[in-house]
Image (cartoon, coloured by chain):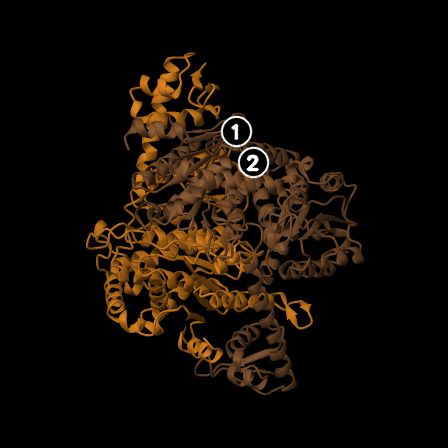
Chain colours: A brown, B orange
Amino acid sequence: MDSLSRWRRFKESLCDCPGLGVSVDYSRMLFPPEFFETMGPKIERAFHEMKALEAGAIANPDENRMVGHYWLRSPERAPTAELRRTIEKALRDVKKFARDVHAGRVRPPRSKRFENVLIIGIGGSALGPQFVSRALRTAKDKMRAFFFDNTDPDGIDAVLGQLAQAGGLARTLAVAISKSGATKETRNGMLEAEAAWTRAKLSFPRHAVAVTGDGSELDRHSTVQGWLARFPMWDWVGGRTSELAAVGLLPAALQGVDVDGMLLGARYMDEATRVADARRNPAAVLALMWHHAGGGRGLKDMVVLPYKDRLELFSRYLQQLVMESLGKERDLAGNRVEQGIAVYGNKGSTDQHAYVQQLRDGVNNFFVTFLEVLRDRQGRSLAVEPGVTAGDYLSGFLQGTRRALADKGRESITVTVDHLDAMTIGKLIALYERAVGFYASLAGINAYHQPGVEAGKKAAGVVIELQKKVVAHLRTHRGAAFTSEELAEAIGESAETETVHWVLRHLAANPDHRVKKRPGKSPFSTTYSVA
Amino acid sequence: MDSLSRWRRFKESLCDCPGLGVSVDYSRMLFPPEFFETMGPKIERAFHEMKALEAGAIANPDENRMVGHYWLRSPERAPTAELRRTIEKALRDVKKFARDVHAGRVRPPRSKRFENVLIIGIGGSALGPQFVSRALRTAKDKMRAFFFDNTDPDGIDAVLGQLAQAGGLARTLAVAISKSGATKETRNGMLEAEAAWTRAKLSFPRHAVAVTGDGSELDRHSTVQGWLARFPMWDWVGGRTSELAAVGLLPAALQGVDVDGMLLGARYMDEATRVADARRNPAAVLALMWHHAGGGRGLKDMVVLPYKDRLELFSRYLQQLVMESLGKERDLAGNRVEQGIAVYGNKGSTDQHAYVQQLRDGVNNFFVTFLEVLRDRQGRSLAVEPGVTAGDYLSGFLQGTRRALADKGRESITVTVDHLDAMTIGKLIALYERAVGFYASLAGINAYHQPGVEAGKKAAGVVIELQKKVVAHLRTHRGAAFTSEELAEAIGESAETETVHWVLRHLAANPDHRVKKRPGKSPFSTTYSVA
């Protein structure tokens, strides 16, 4: 393409919403001239479906649920006055609680003020809070955020070590977040936290709040124990779209983030992406470009490269939002489609030094989304060369990489924002939420359920039950040594010999169950016993 | 597959090296029965090529270089006595310097001891140090590590803010790492660091050391300024395989990591992966399974899921090691092959809550590598249920996910290590270094060059030069306002109108060049001027 056509194409393919401060350049996507026309009926249907969803239709038919995350920033759009009041009250409660904590009106028994917040959650209850915390943290934050986002004992110990150095548990507020209240990782994290507070001779309930659904296991537990507060989750907000519910707002407000700004940004983006004109609607543009890139079947990975260190967790957040929403076996008609779009990336220009070699020269199984933030930093910059700043280089590397990829026929989108603040974060969240919704309509799938995640949890439950049988058998046959095969047979689980083997291997590496191993000539003749 | 065949297949497909403490299970890869036989000649050739490489052959023909990272942990294998001495001396120097810093013999002018280390590097000069620092950090570390790994001014300011809270620059040792000494991001980071130390009225040279090649720009700069020390880089060690050279050893040793343990682990793994029997060689097994999964053409992404928080940067490290090594346009015969394997992943079970939905149900464009660490934590664990620990759950989730994926025909490898320490990290690094080398032989490509990365840097340079012209023109025509098109024409760069537009947009968002914008009806009628 000659330079003049490139410039013309750029001008035609820039979705710039006046006043929004966000633009989407899709000139480097090689869609055919008739693409928007061809896709017209499909994107029209997507607009209609989105409108119905926003009005309270059952948009998640498998679970018979409304999908209401758009109401969180426009409560007046909620389908009933009661829902509206519920949303508004939750926001008021979150902000009041944060103010009370900051002012020391809600305070820990043995310290003047809560200085740290330990967020205990996983998936939709951690990725959003982590993304926002990292994106907006400053030296002047009201509280410093820490996370238990797994059931890794060593990881938990490491965070407890950091908290000890940051003033200790006496100054730490724990926020346990679980919609169902039954997520095992979060339950385990909460129990490990309780134990740590107890070891420090501190009352955990006086340091803890919950964000969870009405009547959940966590709701009951926190009520019985008399925790400081409980904030709601609702069945019409999915975990991966809950950043602007209490799940995300409470941690953000505690850190000192302008949550009203986040909500307002999302509201503005919602307005801009309700426009029923695909080329003028940035979320529609994204969805259509994803569809073009991957042939509507996810044939290309989405590589997300924000040129801004603060945004390095955006791709993790998007991994859930995009992959869990779109990675579906069946379409709404029940056909087997195996949909999805793989997402990865960290930040530019850092990632250029990791894998732009492959992006430019290697397997062409991706499209890039560059994320550009025009403002470099607070204040002025040093000249690293006469008339050039480090930020000029950052901008130059983004542009250079975009061009180097285009020269080799590699496609890219660039999302440009003016600067990074709470409002911008709200806009980005809303932009991608709606793009995912539109894409699901284009692909004819349900973006709001996750039927595939139960199997792994169930299989894990089987492992835990089998472990109990293994340990029980070794204990009732103290001193006797078994190979994996012998033990599986002895407990009547020969069909699960492999699992028994893995369980024994793990048990013997840890002191808790007193299982010892005696290595054999091969891993399969190794024997296990309890002394 | 019934359970008995599953167990038989597991036993047949476990590559367990006695005494190594690392095993590779590939029973869930659906390779055909004749696969190892079919691949026999190819893997034999890979063994031969690796042997020649280790003996000092020119294994990087494009750059006419030896590839010597295996000598770093077995200096006696270096092809000349001089190289051997060079390697041994560098290691001694690194360890001595770290001891001197820890003991306060090398100390900052205004503090008793260096407490922090700020590593300034990018790509191969940051990803390894970051991975190792995160994997092995403890509350008892000798020094705390921070990183400038980009040319993002705001990111630099954020790290400076953290350093201020961690005792300040007076207690911080800066380590600038750049093999060529000319990497712009690192150069900019170094200049920003110099400026910060100077603002704090501290001598930067008295707080700085360099790791760079003989005679490089950075070498000259640090020598002229009289920095505390300089450690070598060699042209026969590639950036992405330099973790066990001074690049990685110096930051690790300063943090307090057992670098001898790292080297010994790598040495052990090297020995185990020199075995010329594919099924008994864990690196050969990995390379062959990657080849099987992606049809030898990278058709499947590699999803890396360590079930251990400490390993969450392993996939970033592997992104460079794998993608930059294997993402090549041409094979050694010059045919256009567009090779590569995309790598992504963070950690389990956390990532299960982000995208196992897609892995299990959605587009089947990947294979998983589970990384299992048998030992859960230091010391004993709490029972989160009678007889069950948080670590038992972590193990259960890994096993459950592996099974749930296999039930849907999704392939996985599991790498199991006994526990996590410096030696294990050395083993993992060496395992993947050699697997990448073997895979490159199987695919017939040069794993040791990166011809595709220059284009983006060059294009960035063009942008920077254009920016200078833009600013100069606006300054010589003070007060005059130009649209992008007008300005591009005025400076005789109409062919680069798009770049001029992007440059102006960025300039106007920052105060440094005094460029102001006056918004027009569209982004293209916006005008820019210097007052």
Query: In the rendered image of this protein, does residue B514 appear above or below residue A158?
Result: above
At a point 36% along the width and 52% down the height, the residue shown is B323
* Cα separation between marks 1 and 2: 9 Å
**At x 44% / y 27%, what residue is drawn?**
B506
Indicate the position of residue B139 as horizontal and vertical percent values.
Answer: 58, 56
Say few, some or many: other residues with alpha carbon within 10 Å of mark 2 (under 14 / 14 to 19 / 20 or more). Answer: many
Counting residues from the start of the chain, the first of labels 1 and 2 encountered is 1
Q: Is residue A336 above or below residue A272?
A: below
Q: Residue at x 48, y 39 (%)?
A: A43
Left or right, A184 with respect to B183, comes to right
Amino acid beneath label 2: Lys
x and y, in percent, of residue A139 in the image: 60, 38
From the image, tell me which residue sits under label 1: A21
Check the residue under mark 1 and report the chain it is in: A
Which quadrant of the rendered structure holds the C terminus of chain A?
bottom right
Q: Quadrant of residue B73?
A: bottom left
* Residue behind mark 2: A427
Q: Nearer the viewer, residue A239 or A420?
A: A239
Tell if the residue under mark 1 belongs to the same chain as the one under mark 2.
yes
In the image, is residue B203 above or below residue B52? above
Q: For this view, does A516 lie left or right of residue B192? A: right
Point out residue A370 in the picture as x, y percentages from the top left corner: 43, 39
Outermost left residue? B333
Residue A143 x %, y %: 66, 42
Q: Element at badge 2?
A: helix
Q: Judge from the rendering whether residue A155 lies leftward or rightward of residue B344; answer left or right.
A: right
Residue B378 in view of the camera: no
The chain letter for the residue carrying disc 2 is A
Q: What is the quadrant of the N terminus of chain A in the image?
A: top left
Give the residue type that dot 1 points to: Gly
Residue B302: which quarter of the image? Answer: bottom left
In contact (CB < 8 Å): disc 1 and disc 2: yes
